[in-house]
Amino acid sequence: MSPSDRTTANLGRHHILPPYMLEHLAENGPEELREAVVTDLSIDRSLRATRVARPVAGFATAEDTEDTSPNRTVYDAHNLRQLPGTEVLREGGEPVSDVAVTEAYDGLGATFAFWWEVFGRNSIDGNGLPLDASVHYSRAYDNAFWDGEQMVFGDGDGQLFNRFTVSVDVIGHELAHGVTGAVRDLEYQGQSGALNESLSDVFGSLVKQYAADPKQTTEQADWLIGEGLLTSSVQGVALRSMKAPGTAYDDPNLGKDPQPATMADYVETTDDNGGVHINSGIPNRAFYLAAAGFGGYAWEKAGQIWFAALSSPDLTTTATFAEFAAATAEQAEELFGAEARTVVEGAWGEVGVEVGGAAPQEPGEGEVSGGVGQTDGETKVVDVTQAEADASAEANQI
Ligand SMILES: [Zn+2]
């Protein structure tokens, strides 16, 4: 493959901690943490502003990927912001004593196993994308992110946040942004952005439930995102609760979990890309309710339905909650019959989203970039100029 036609999956750049949480910390947190958080916020903002579609080095072809085992590499960034850092563990290598390295490696493996065993999807892009991660990024860094090419984990400040490799659902969440970007690149703004966030929570939580030993049913799962990430000095249990949005934390340093559970409390805001991490509570709870309605393992019915809805060719990249809800209802019936449609419609109804027919498509919407009409697993070829590639590489070294 020549460099001029490198394949690009639109895998996106996403942080696990939403900006409003860090902003609250910057203003109200312990004195000694404030300055670092302000610096991190400004760097994260500049990273977020950079293009999201990036060339994927060494992109495997379908032929190469007959072998469906993960291809993981973990690097140590040595508390610098230079990525990826030095290689410390490669697929099948000897175990290491650094717990962050082990957790990152295992989390990538759990996520790979989930997508392959449940959906037959070979890695994030459906095409065997190697899974890379860097740990010990920056100093006391309070975040983790997927930069479109790899996972990046901070150590946390130790006062409020533990190391960011600690929650497997956080790893599953970040990598699911890559899946969504490759399957149907839901615009990261307003309701489609909140759906994008919600799908990452859904699949992140399913990765955790699937990886548990023994596997967890809907009833056994905690439905929390980031459980274990907050230290014992924080008044809270996690970053978000899918079962009870708005109840994950209420803490002087971090503020109160702002997620609504129903449309009646939908938050209109221009912050956070129109509240993508806030209003995601609504579709999160709809998923939980659907899963509870079916019972058993959540990936067997609700998870299949949600992923089929995301993959459905009619879903636009600017889908609203109601449009996505309609897609899930349709897929429920197609996959599991009329009773399943009733369960799914009931779940959306309970969070105040009316499942109408498919919403009329606006003219030209079918052409929205991000691959409407793409089939699952396909990637698109984007003409990436050297200048863009350089700018993107540079952004990582700020
Ligand atoms: Zn996210």
Image: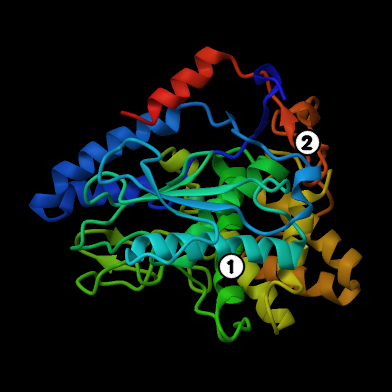
Which x, y percent locates residue 203? 61, 62
Q: Can residue 179 be seen here? A: yes
Is residue 230 toward the left or the right of residue 258 in the image? left
State the residue lying farthest toward the front: 94
Q: Residue at x 26, y 40 (%)?
A: 80
The answer to whether residue 184 is visible is no
Residue at the limit of the structure toward the left, as seen here: 31
Percent x, y of residue 284: 58, 63
Which badge, 2 or 1, comes first in the chain's sequence? 1
Q: Is residue 128 above or below residue 215?
A: above
Which quadrant, please, contains the C terminus? top left
Q: Which residue lies under the disc numbered 1?
A: 207
Badge 2 density bin: few <14, some 14–19, many ≥20, Cα 10 Å: many
Estimate how packed mark 1 is, as few (under 14), some (14 to 19) or many (20 or more) residues with alpha carbons within 10 Å. Answer: many
Q: As rendered, which of 13 and 93 lies closer to the eye?
A: 93
The quarter of the rendered structure image containing the N terminus is: top right
* 335 displayed left or right of 396: right
User: What residue is shown with label 2?
Assistant: 372
Q: Amino acid at mark 2?
A: Val
In the rendered image of this protein, does residue 393 appear above or below residue 295? above
User: How far across and how far down the image is residue 84, in percent?
Assistant: 40, 40
* Distance (Cα) linking label 2 and label 1: 26 Å
Relative side of 172 to 363, left or right: left
Provide the secondary structure element on which disc 1 rests.
helix
